[in-house]
């Protein structure tokens, strides 16, 4: 049975790295789900074990934040914001700065994947209408969404998982991670500006920039719900309960159908999380991860120091993806220290900017841009992604070391 589990585990994470299997139209979520089904079928897991393997508080927080973000989307805020960005600044330097600031700021409070999914098409439309090349701004949006999301425990899926596993405090997380996130935003802006300098073009008025309605009542409701959520995070209430309570109240509406709001939830991501939890639990039952951790501890190679965490975060995020990498590591590493959890959150998130497949936000921007007629290639992203990632990870490492959260070596 161990051989079967190890084989399915290997196939799953090869699929995570490739994104899909050649000749098939099955994506990462489908690969993980099929593997989990096969583990149930062959008896490697029973139904109770599969259910117990799922970290439901993490799933609940993701679900609640997606519903809250759906309230913003339903109000027209994301489209309105993207078009305002495309119209506002009269110089490429200012426009890029605004895109980075808004993309990063929104991603710190709302899930970064949802932010870029909603904003990319309208940003492409507005920039194209002004005869500007959308590609550097899209790279800035993706880079800022990743960097900004590193600041908070609700900025991206891997941070949510890390916060739940470590029972971390929301405001303590912000205190530790906000500085490297802000530095990352500055580095994203500077890198894109330097790499694309002289090739932005000059804005040509507003052209045929479309307009979108903004439902101010629904937007006010979304903002009030967000403020209420942040207040609840200061109280001794389980975070998953706070998020679900806010999401439930948001769905009570006379104008927005709950079916429409639930339709905006990224169910694929939730299924991916659940399937990976089950797969990793099955591997844990074999005893192999525990033995590996024991060997790494004896050899001094646990990722509780920056000399190990830095290359691990960079390699994991840009092979199998930062979300699967974090799920895998936390499944095998039962009791990481608090400082290492902060390091894991910040470094895996920033590492996602390295290559186009490094984070789901990058992939979403590229795919949504392609649907809008803008091709953002692997090499174009890498020319900005590689330097911005190495610089931002170096700054984050210095911050974590200087503040005493993680040593460089044991």
Image: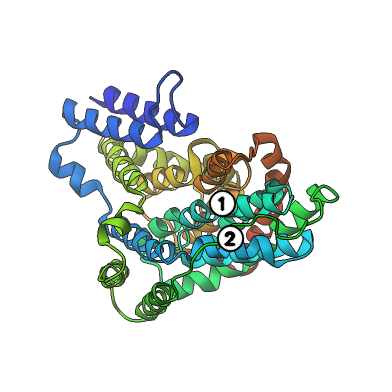
Residue at the spot 47% in from the left edge and 41% down from the top edge: 296
How many numbered discs? 2
Location of residue 56 in the rendering, given as x and y in whole percent from the top left corner = 26, 55
Q: Are marks 2 and 1 in contact (CB under 8 Å)?
A: yes
Disc 2 crowd rating (10 Å Cα; few below 14, some 14-19, many 20+) is: many
209 and 306: which is toward the camera? 209
Residue at the spot 14% in from the left edge and 37% down from the top edge: 46
Which quadrant of the rendered structure holds the N terminus?
A: top left
Asked if residue 365 shows in the view, the reply is: yes
Left or right relative to 253: residue 357: right
Residue at the spot 78% in from the left edge and 57% down from the top edge: 203
Disc 1 crowd rating (10 Å Cα; few below 14, some 14-19, many 20+) is: many
Alpha-carbon span between mark 2 and mark 1: 8 Å
Of the image marks 2 and 1, the number of the one nearer the N terminus: 2
| Residue that label 2 marks | 82
Residue at the extreme right of the image, as rendered: 198
- The quarter of the picture where residue 232 lies is bottom left
Location of residue 169 in the rendering, given as x and y in whole percent from the top left corner = 41, 72
| Residue that label 1 marks | 120
Residue at the extreme front of the image, as rendered: 208
Residue at the spot 52% in from the left edge and 41% down from the top edge: 316
Taking 152 as reference, is 203 above or below it?
A: above
Q: Which colour scheme is used?
A: rainbow
Q: Please, what secondary structure does the residue beneath circle 1 have?
A: helix
276 and 24: which is toward the camera? 24
Q: Please, what secondary structure does the residue beneath circle 2 have?
A: helix
Left or right relative to 356: residue 225: left
* The label number, if any, that marks residue 391 in the structure image: none
Location of residue 15 in the rendering, given as x and y in whole percent from the top left corner = 43, 29
């Amino acid at each position: 049975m161990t051989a079967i589990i190890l084989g399915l585990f290997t196939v799953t994470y090869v699929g995570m790295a490739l994104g899909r299997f050649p000749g098939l139209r099955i994506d990462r979520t489908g690969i993980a789900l099929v593997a989990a089904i096969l583990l149930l079928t062959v008896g490697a897991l029973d139904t109770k074990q599969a259910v117990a393997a799922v970290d439901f508080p993490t799933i609940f927080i993701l679900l609640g934040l997606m519903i809250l973000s759906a309230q913003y989307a339903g109000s027209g805020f994301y489209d309105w914001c993207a078009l305002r960005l495309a119209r506002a600044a009269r110089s490429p330097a200012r426009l890029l700065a605004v895109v980075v600031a808004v993309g990063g700021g929104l991603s710190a409070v709302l899930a970064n994947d949802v932010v870029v999914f909603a904003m990319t098409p309208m940003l492409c439309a507005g920039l194209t209408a002004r005869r500007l090349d959308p590609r550097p701004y899209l790279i800035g949006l993706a880079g800022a969404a990743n960097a900004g999301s590193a600041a908070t425990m609700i900025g991206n899926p891997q941070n949510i998982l890390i916060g739940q596993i470590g029972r971390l405090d929301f405001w303590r997380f912000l205190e530790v991670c906000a500085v490297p996130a802000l530095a990352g935003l500055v580095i994203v802006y500077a890198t894109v500006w330097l790499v694309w300098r002289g090739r932005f073009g000059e804005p040509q008025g507003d052209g045929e920039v479309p307009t979108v309605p903004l439902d101010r009542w629904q937007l006010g409701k979304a903002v009030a719900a967000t403020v209420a959520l942040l207040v609840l995070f200061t109280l001794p209430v389980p975070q998953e309960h706070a998020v679900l309570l806010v999401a439930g109240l948001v769905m009570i509406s006379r104008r927005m159908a709950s079916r429409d709001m639930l339709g905006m939830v990224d169910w694929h991501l939730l299924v991916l999380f659940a399937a990976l939890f089950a797969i990793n639990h099955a591997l844990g039952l074999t005893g192999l991860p525990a033995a590996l951790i024991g060997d790494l501890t004896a050899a001094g190679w646990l990722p509780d120091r920056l000399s190990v965490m830095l290359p691990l975060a960079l390699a994991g995020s840009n092979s199998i993806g930062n979300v699967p990498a974090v799920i895998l590591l936390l499944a095998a590493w039962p009791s990481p220290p608090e400082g290492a959890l902060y390091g894991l959150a910040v470094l895996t998130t920033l590492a996602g900017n390295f290559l186009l497949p490094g984070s789901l936000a990058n992939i979403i921007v590229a795919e949504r841009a392609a649907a809008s007629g803008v091709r953002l290639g692997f090499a174009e992203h890498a020319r900005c992604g590689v330097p911005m990632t190495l610089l931002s990870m170096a700054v984050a490492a210095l911050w974590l070391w200087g503040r005493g959260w993680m040593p460089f070596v044991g």
